[in-house]
Image (tube, helix red, strand yellow):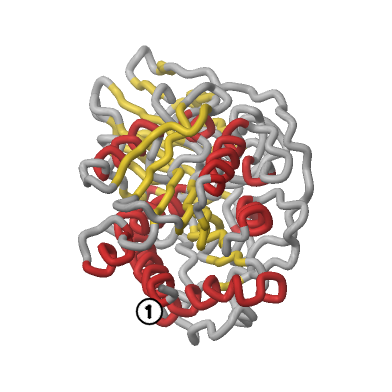
Amino acid sequence: MKKITYIIFILAALVACKNQKSVAKGYQGQGKSVIVSTLSKPVQKQWKGIWTFDNEEVFFSNDFESGRLNGITYDGNDHYTALITAENTPVNVSPWYAFKVWSKTPRTITIKMTYQDSRSRYYPKISTDGENFVALDSSNYKPINEGTGTFGIKATPEFVEIIVTTSQEPTYITAQELYGSTRVKKWVDSLTNKPFISTYEIGKSKENRAMNLMEISNGDHKKAVMVISRQHPPEVTGFLAMKSFIETLSGDSPKAQKFRDNYDVFVVPLMNPDGVDNGNWRHNMGGIDLNRDWQDFNQPETRSVRDFLVKKESEGYEFVFGADFHSTWDDIYYPIDSTITGQKGKIVFDWIDSITKRLPQKHTNVNPSTDIKPTMVSRNYFYVNHNMPAIVFELGDNTPRDFLKEKGKVAAEELMNLLDSQN
């Protein structure tokens, strides 16, 4: 089989970043976030069910957590066209898709992927069980109207055609691995068998799903780390790095045990359960980008975390570090510029440097921000309202999964080193 040759967005190893003023070439990050209203807007909820074709020989379905397929047509000669549309507009170009296909008898079909006002950002993943995914073999992948450049939506094909062999057992075809609320809860529950880990609800989402928080604590401490993930549903690589990060902090190593003697960790692994389970491109079911709602708190998901932080501070907690895990075109760090945070924020840049030294094979750009008001995004709210050094920790859409796991592990170990040195 051919190796996957589609763009993997991995930069060659470069000189380790010495400070926040990175000058290395590569993905330089997004510009200043535009201020937008976060009052709820209408959302078009997709129809969920099964499409049948060719005298009921071939079947497509989006009827599962995180499913997204808005339409499918049969073009003849075992060729189908899939339509992927967003929950509402305007929306970030993150065209999430997830569906399964099967047939009564084995056959080979071609599926053309088309998108509403977007291009083919995510390279297809396939699975037979909905949990173990591999990238589609490149010999079964055909880009149409290829893009230009290296990063961003313009660098991606306008459409793609994929070839899939079907049988009676469904094949999942997805933009990224599936981690809906049921699977995330299963992961959280697998950790709560440890006596120092508990989980509880801190609020409800727009569609009344539980906003679950994991607490890692083995004592009556008053210093804590705050971690959140999946404000944006398709950003699975950020979740996978966060997953490794938390598993390391809660692990059995002497370093982790010593760390937990002094610090608690609070984690909201699924900030947007409605968006994730509905297969949204970006928004919650209020039609809003949650990472623009940390100023006005018009959405119940952000209010849940705000109220939790306020409550914990009223109990005497000091939050010493905050991390918000995301995904984008390539690995990048978004701290607050040290000209704003001064000595208080030095730990963030020391952390970046420490990770870089241990993982020099994958350069990660650094894009500090000097704009902290209106708070709007989680990192700014954490710092302005809770005096918490914080960072947006972004992982590339196509960063290799073994490296995601290693980076999460290293990030946790280096944070523990830095915080322990302060005691």
Q: Quadrant of residue 212?
A: top left
SS of the residue under disc 1: helix
Residue hosting label 1: 358
Name the quarter where the N terminus is drawn.
bottom left
Closest to the observer, 335 or 213: 213
**In x, y percent, where is residue 184?**
36, 38
Residue 90 horizontal side relative to residue 118, left or right: right
> How crowded is the residue under tag 1: few (<14 C-alpha within 10 Å), some, or many (20+)?
some
Query: At label 1, which amino acid type do we have?
Result: Arg
Residue furthest to the top: 55
For the C terminus, give its image quadrant.
Answer: bottom left
> Percent position (x, y) of residue 259?
33, 65
Q: Is residue 236 visible?
A: yes
Q: Is 53 situated above or below 357?
A: above
Which residue is located at x 37 percent, y 79 percent? 358
Visible residue check, residue 107: no
Residue at x-position 42% and y-position 80%: 360
Quarter of the image for residue 349 reads bottom right
Q: Residue at x 22, y 68 (%)?
A: 254
Residue 143: percent from the left, percent from the top? 51, 51
Q: Describe residue 273's horizontal placement relative to residue 296 as left or right.
A: left
